[in-house]
């Protein structure tokens, strides 16, 4: 599996880095593709398990949320509509709940669970990963913040994996992810702090040393929880990978699971403390 994994990374990583640099609509389309495919994987897995999430509603509602993220991030929305994302989310939930009271499938066995899975897919995939758009549009360092987000995830995850394989003895969450170890986690945290420190010295000079320390830790830990949450999902369904879309890497959710947690964590930390 090393060759397919290498070839996928050889093509995918430069593409992502280029689109982050360009930003705007090209980056939006990248994030949209990632989220749409991730949502498809999420619904497909539960459909194979016998549930019936409302996929069409999920795709439409998810698309509206992403457009709201995009326009608010760019500052193109009317200032009075800065709460547009929350408005769409709230009224979408209320409308769909009301609609389901009168639908035939609402009386089916497991109908309420299908409704919950429909919305959980939107929250878990669309809402969380949608923060990538907000991070990219933070002025004037959105590009640098986004590079920091992706590179910290990639590098710390790689360091944690290799240290865990080589030196790992104490399991972190054996029932969810047997390969996760405390040794690997500690290595990932130190690597995360190192990556943020490099960004401070070359690109983000306004960061204090305290910012470096805190961001390095929270990004690594948030990424770990994102990874574990996706592993928990696969354990519940009984699959190894969410799909085979990315040769050697599994599916979209397998590859971008870390970012589901790190994107919102970084965005709100930057908005509140920098």
Image: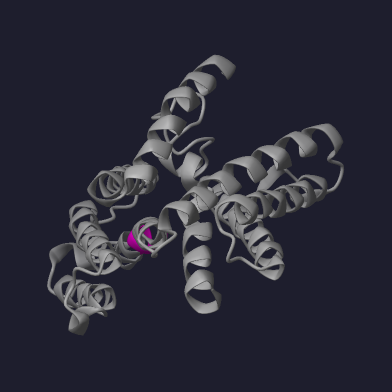
Q: Is residue 150 above or below residue 210?
A: above
- Residue 121 colored in magenta in the image: yes
* Span colored in magenta: 120-124
Identify the image quadrant of the N terminus.
top right
> Can the viewer see residue 199?
yes
> Can the viewer see residue 233?
no
Out of 83 and 180, give the one closest to the viewer: 83
Residue 218 image-quadrant placement: bottom right
Question: Is residue 96 left or right of 249 when viewed as pictured?
Answer: left
Question: Is residue 167 left or right of 255 when viewed as pictured?
Answer: right
Question: Is residue 199 left or right of 129 when viewed as pictured?
Answer: right
Q: Which residue is drawn at 38% across and 48% down?
A: 42
Q: Which residue is drawn at 26% across and 69% down?
A: 72
Out of 121 and 5, give the one closest to the viewer: 5
Q: Residue 14: percent from the left, percent from the top? A: 43, 31
Q: Residue at x 22, y 73 (%)?
A: 88
Q: Residue 175: percent from the left, percent from the top? A: 70, 49
Question: Is residue 31 left or right of 64 when viewed as pictured?
Answer: right
- Residue 169 colored in magenta in the image: no
Magenta residues, dominant SS class: helix
Determine the residue located farthest toward the top in the rendered image: 3
Out of 107 and 162, give the one closest to the viewer: 162
């Amino acid at each position: 599996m090393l060759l397919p994994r290498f070839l996928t990374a050889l093509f995918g990583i430069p593409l992502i880095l280029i689109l982050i640099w360009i930003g705007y609509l090209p980056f939006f389309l990248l994030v949209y593709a990632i989220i749409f495919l991730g949502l498809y994987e999420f619904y497909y897995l539960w459909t194979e398990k016998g549930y019936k999430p409302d996929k069409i509603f999920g795709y439409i509602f998810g698309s509206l949320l992403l457009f709201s993220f995009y326009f608010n991030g760019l500052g193109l929305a009317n200032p009075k509509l800065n709460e547009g994302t929350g408005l769409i989310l709230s009224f979408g939930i209320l409308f769909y709940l009301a609609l389901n009271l009168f639908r035939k499938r609402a009386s089916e066995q497991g109908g309420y669970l299908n409704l919950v899975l429909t919305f959980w897919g939107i929250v878990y995939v669309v809402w969380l990963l949608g923060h990538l758009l907000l991070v990219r549009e933070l002025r004037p360092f959105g590009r640098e913040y986004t590079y920091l987000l992706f590179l910290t995830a990639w590098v710390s995850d790689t360091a944690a994996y290799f240290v865990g394989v080589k030196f790992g003895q104490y399991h972190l969450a054996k029932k969810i992810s047997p390969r996760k170890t405390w040794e690997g986690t500690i290595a990932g945290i130190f690597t995360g702090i190192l990556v943020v420190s490099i960004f401070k010295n070359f690109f983000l000079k306004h960061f204090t040393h305290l910012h470096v320390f805190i961001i390095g830790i929270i990004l690594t830990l948030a990424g770990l929880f994102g990874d574990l949450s996706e592993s928990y999902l696969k354990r519940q369904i009984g699959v190894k990978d969410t799909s085979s879309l990315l040769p050697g890497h599994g599916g979209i959710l397998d590859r971008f699971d870390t970012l589901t947690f790190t994107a919102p964590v970084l965005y709100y930390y930057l908005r509140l403390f920098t």
